[in-house]
Amino acid sequence: MKKNIKLIASSLIAMGLIASPVASAKEIVIKFSHVTTEATPKGKGAMLLKKMVDERLGGKVRVEVYPSSQLYGDKAVLKALLLNDVQLAAPSLSKFSKYTKQWALFDLPFLFKNPQALNCFTDSAKGQALLGATERKGIKGLGYWLNGMKQISANHPLIKPEDAKGLKFRIMSSDVLKAQFEAVDANPQKMAFSEVYNALATGVIDGQENTWSNIRSKKFFEVQKDTTISNHGVLEYALVTNKRFWNSLPSDIRLQLDQIITEVTAEVTQFALDAAVKDMKTVADSGKTNIHTLTDAQKQQWVSAMKPVWSQFEDQVGKDNIAAVQQCNAKN
Ligand code: LMR
């Protein structure tokens, strides 16, 4: 009798009329690939997301985190995401130019006054609308993750814009960043994040721009004699997923993941604000790079040299978006 029941049950499962207990218990695996170390705002955010998913959705969903470009580097990760080989990534907004031209807004030099102004914009209706810019390419933006303000470094002091002349600077794959360095007669080179340390150490490039957390965690300060507190640009991430994968999730799971992401995003902001202070201090205390502070007049020279870049890109990024950022600057 028991045997017969089993037989009937397995026939019904095979016919798809009832769900197999194994199939219904199948865990959803979300692979999260990124390029920074675990000890960065993004690295910590990824681990916190994993922890919260374990706590709230354990058995149903599992997040696997692959930091430090160990699974995919800058370019490959978005291709892998579209193939659904990974389901989460958080590249810098500067790395999406193949998928949207609008996120170039975030690269405009001296556009954002500080991280608070950046958060004000990304939280605004315009910022939230912009998060959807890659959707028609199959990439869904789930949230903005903060890193912070970029600083500039080389092997001699960068005090005036002319000090950058002729130097090779590594940039992320952004045409705005290219134009920014060309505006000071420097020579920008697009390069993957994982290659920057060696390129600096061997002199393939002379300088770089990045946030304190990346300068510290990737040890760029050990191979750069001079670092200027320039705060000339921002590094902001888009936490993205494969749109089709996301839409295929059971709606209750998607809702819970959304809630977790909202909570993690708030924590990432705090990790980033803390890292900007702590990592700058670690770099300064190391004594391995001379930290230069610009006077207001010196800073103004960099602004005057780089800001003309805006007019080249304002149609592409939207004058209304630039105006919205300026309103946030005024409030912060
Ligand atoms: C870079 O390439 O410099 C950054 O985007 C790396 C990162 O993810 O913070």
Image (tube, rainbow, N blue to C red):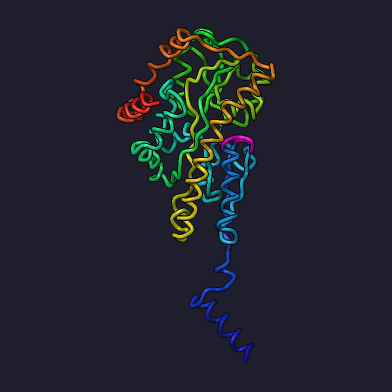
Q: Which residues are magenta?
A: 36-41
Q: Quadrant location of ligand 1?
A: top right
Say which residue appears at 55% left-offset and 12% top-offset: 293
Residue nearest the observer in this picture, 98 or 123: 123
12 shown above or below 44: below
Q: Is residue 186 left or right of residue 6?
A: left
Is the magenta region chiefly helix, strand or loop? loop
**Image quadrant containing the C terminus:** top left
Query: Does residue 185 show up magenta in the picture?
Result: no
Q: Is residue 207 above or below residue 26?
A: above
Q: Is residue 220 above or below residue 304?
A: below
Question: Which residue is located at x 64 percent, y 26 percent?
Answer: 216
The answer to which image quadrant residue 284 occupies is top right
Q: Residue at x 43, y 30 (%)?
A: 118
Label count reads 0
Q: Is residue 20 left or right of residue 248?
A: right
Residue under the point 63% across and 22% down: 281
Quadrant housing the N terminus: bottom right
Give the quarter of the image for residue 151: top right
